Image (cartoon, grey):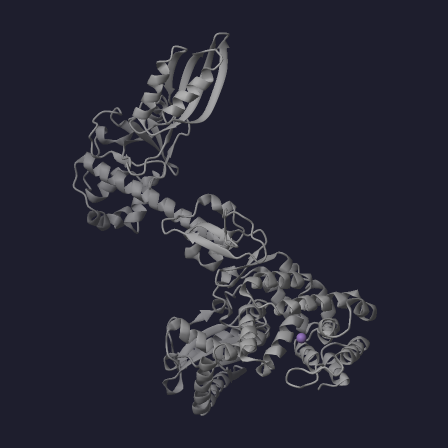
Amino acid sequence: MMRQYELVERVASYIDEPDENLLNKAYVYAMQKHGEQKRADGDPYFSHPLEVAAILTDLHLDEETIAVALLHDTIEDTDATRREIDEIFGAKIGHLVEGLTKIKRLDLVSQKAKQAENLRRLLLAISDDIRVLLVKLSDRLHNMRTLGVMRPEKCERIATETMEIYAPLAGRIGMQDLRDELEELSFKYINPEAYKAVMGHLADIGEKNEELTFQIAEIIGNKLKSANINARVSSRRKKPYSVFRKMESKGVTFEQLSDLYAFRIVVDEVEDCYRALGLVHTEWKMVPGRFKDYISVPKQNQYQSLHTTIVGPANQRAELQIRTETMHRIAEFGIAAHSNYKDGTDDQNESTAYTSLRSTIAQLAESDSPEEFMEHTKLELFLDQVFCFTPKGRIIALPKGATPVDFAYAVHTDIGNSCIGCKLNGKIMPVITELQNGDEVEIIRSSKQMPPAAWESVVVTGKARSSIRKATRQAVRKQYSTLGARMIERAFARAEKQYDQDMLVASLPRLARKSIMDVQAEVGRGEMSANDVIKAIYTDYEPDETTKPKRSKPVGTDEEKPSRIPIRGIKSELPISFSKEGGAVPGDKIVGILVPGEGITIYPSQSRLLEKYRDDGAELIDLRWDIDEEHPERFPARIRLLVGNKPGTLAMVAEVIARNDGNIQNLNMKVLVDEFVEMEIDIDVWGLPHLTRIIEELKSKPVISKVSRITQ
Ligand code: MN
């Protein structure tokens, strides 16, 4: 067992003039309180808090944290009280110890259903002070190291919890070494056979290849030396759990895993990294697709390194990480090469809060005044985070204010794009609900879904926002190109020229466009005229006056003209819009006005606005209805009534409309003279016959003297 003075010396190795008094008091107090207590393996109980404290000295933590580590089990397991600890050590330490006590009680609850609540409370405690988490993780690490003496079921339960909650938490705050060890220990208990197999393989390889590994490292080292690059080359031990996970996710055997040799090259300067890379690539073949430059583009968690894989000596693939000393230190403080995909999340999902936590911890280790930095770590970091679960129990960290839509995108872009609803803790809720810590979120998906553009203003994560924007952009582009394709076909039909897409492909260079879709989208947007497309294919083509769209024939003639663009409805695959009041309804003859960049606005052909557009030289597009009988939609129409000013008249009008399946959206009344009232009513109808039926019945009422339809 570590002696009192040894502990003080350890702290003094990284803190000038540490608060020895505090350390000594905590050591003695905890030792006395735990007294004769024994651990399950027969060791004195006090050895446990002492080991936890020792782990924390390796992380260069401050005296208060070390004291809290020594005291962390006293309230729970001895007759110590919060009040007593407050009196001896101050309220701050008392508060931290109590926080740990609360979490400890949570460990005892094993049901899966309680896990979310446990985590929520754990995180509340953490958000109070990051040191609670640091002590808790070290506590868990020591318990995992000494787990073997417990009953197998208990071992498995604790190991599972460690794997699911504590290891990812350690990873997220950048303590990669701690995480690796927690995972390795958990793996051993959760899947003993696989663990044994992987460890066996690794040991075999290690033994068999020890010489080769050494040689490769030496050859690389000498090569660098001869080029005057000061470098340390070391082999990296593969982590059994990460090997296992790779085998599982790629569905391969151990033998098929190619990159079991891994080396790290640490150099002095950034430019040495690139020089070293050049040398290595000159000497050996690089494996295509494996090179990553995290120096010029660091991971969001600030990890920097060059990664490459070469076919090295003896034809063995070797994975190389090349970095400077500084980069190495940052990485050691938690940002391992594969941390992002190991979490099953991608870079963007990692919040800056964790990044700052990582750098804080990194700074802490280097700092002259750890205390000062601890002050800063008082988890503003976690304060603006919510932690939620997938139905399978995976933790997703999101910024405060995040919605299920953010959650969906955090899990996977495809899940976000296909999200149509959600269940929070088993209950169907709106997707704009603000998530709370511990919520279990189930995303309801549909393959037909396209994220509504309005969601962009609902989400808070950059990933969700950019994905929605991208999906919206793609959908709009598709709409325009669909419209453009039809406009092009229409133009060719009108010009009586033969047309197919192959001809267009051949003329792309003449149009200076890369793809058919580019051409279609530009025509659809009104940025390129369909006649230019004809000219690109038939170079001698001269549009005559009658085929110029601006001088379109009077609308409404030539009913069966095949070049009319079919319009399905409000939710169209085309970039169209209907007037919300007094617009066109199916059965009306319709005309579209192409507004460059905004798509087509649809008007009934009797609209007075059309004349004005025509005079302005806007492009009029012939349209026809193509109503889907299976999925009819309502369209807004507006009528104006002149009615006698008598009680009950309004009720009668409403009754007629309702009985005829009309849907009143809006109603305005104004008294003209004493006897007469003018009403303007917006009704959603299925089409012109439906609207006509309503108008006819209204007309038949004696009290109504005039009914007319109003169009824009
Ligand atoms: Mn403990």
Nearest the eye: 691 or 478: 691
Residue with the most extreme top position: 674
Q: Indicate the quadrant containing the N terminus: top left, top right, bottom left or bottom right.
A: bottom right
- Report the front residue among 674 and 229: 674
Task: Give the image quarter of residue 104.
Answer: bottom right
- How many discs mark residues in the rendered view? 0
Q: Is residue 351 left or right of residue 6?
A: left
Q: Residue at x 62, y 65 (%)?
A: 357
Q: In this rendering, does residue 527 appear at all?
A: no
Q: Is residue 398 above or below residue 536?
A: below
Residue located 63% across and 71% down the image:
362
Q: Where 623 sits versus 290, above or below?
A: above
Residue 340, how many percent across, how many down?
A: 50, 67
Q: Is residue 306 visible?
A: yes
Residue 322 appears left or right of 617: right
Ligand 1 sits in which quadrant? bottom right
The quarter of the rendered structure image containing the C terminus is top left
The image quadrant that residue 251 belongs to is bottom left
x, y (%) of residue 325? 58, 76
Position in image of residue 3 (x %, y %)? 75, 86
**Nearest to the observer: residue 112 or residue 303:** 112
Q: Position of residue 517 (x, y in %)?
A: 30, 48
In percent of the image, x 69 and y 61: which residue is there? 128
Query: 705 above or below 297?
Result: above
